Amino acid sequence: MATVTHSPIIILGSGPAGYTAAIYTGRANLNPILIQGMQPGGQLTVTTEVDNFPGFEEGIQGPELMTRMEAQAKRFNTTILSDLVVQADLEPARRQGGPFRLTCDSGNVYTCDALIIATGASARWLGLESEKRLSGFGVSACATCDGFFYRGQEIAIVGGGDTAVEEALFLTNFASKVFLIHRRDALRAEKMMQARLLAHPKIQPIWNSAVEEVLGDPQAGGVSGVRIKNVQTGESHVLTVTGLFVAIGHTPNTAIFGEQLEKDEAGYLITRPHSTATNIPGVFAAGDVQDKTFRQAITAAGTGCMAALEAERFLNEQAGVATRI
């Protein structure tokens, strides 16, 4: 039988933003509940080496970093649930003066007075079995995270929009050659950025082409090449590269909120300037679910801290208690 459990604050998502929010709200004696969602630990659980998170001089494996964050959140009395929210009742609950109501896949219901949404954004992938098999072993969706590991190597990137062009240009800081694979014969990116890319000596566009297969072995060096098909002629050939970056966009994980929360045209939650507050009082958003620009573990953790402090202030104001921020 389903149970109904109330907590002053609930956090949705278990990436750097969610766990940081849990640590801060836990230290404030709010006894938060954190619902992990579909991918416990977030995108870092499919990342191998994390070399740019402060405090780890020799780097750290993505799954280990998230395990440490989880343990720290638990130390501050965070209740962590392996469940997935399938229905969120926010606006009607607030209009009626009641708590926010969350129904999970398990059937259990959780209510709260303040909610931090840190559900992240999922990278769009090509949908290839070989791409999935080699994810973290030469296949990546984050150039700023993993570009450093390809110093002096030849790599490929897939996409034709602003993100693909920005990341291709960024990768030239490390790689000796960057092949940009695009299904069309022209880019969709902003014109000035296109001009920079097309003039760059390290970048070679491969037009009218799609990746058919990623070649390599996760246990033997990872990616060794990609098989590319010309979408006009049907001809295929193998491109020898040691890394493949997929830059065809991200999808914010906001579908369960429907039209209750304000979103931009891409579906990212809109927060007030210099704040994590959404359009519904008591609901805050942190991490990649509201950040389509940086998408880094450290920036997600920073907004998780902000959301926790703002949520604590909100709860104190509701209770008539003086706040510290």
Image (cartoon, rainbow, N blue to C red):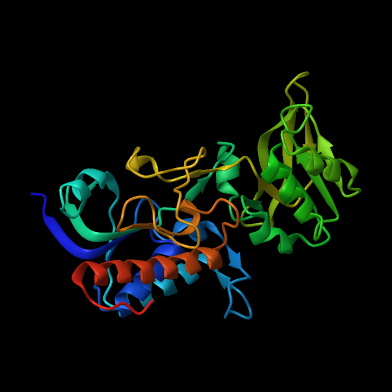
Percent position of residue 243, x then y? 71, 51
Percent position of residue 246, x then y? 64, 44
Residue placed most toward the observer, 319 or 171:
319
Q: Quadrant of residue 66?
A: bottom left
Is residue 78 visible to the viewer in this orientation of the structure?
yes
On the rendered image, what quadrant is the C terminus found in?
bottom left
Q: Is residue 123 left or right of residue 276?
A: right
Image point (19%, 71%), residue name: 319
Residue placed most toward the observer, 308 or 134:
308
Image point (50%, 58%), residue name: 273
In the depicted structure, whether residue 82 falls above or below residue 55: above
Count the numbered circles shown. 0
Percent position of residue 39, x then y? 40, 53
Is residue 35 visible to the viewer in this orientation of the structure?
no
Image point (73%, 36%), residue name: 227
Image point (39%, 63%), residue name: 18
Residue placed most toward the observer, 157 or 220:
157
Q: Quadrant of residue 184?
A: top right
Percent position of residue 206, x then y? 81, 34
Q: Is residue 109 left or right of residue 133?
A: left
> Going by the picture, which residue comes out furthest to the left?
1
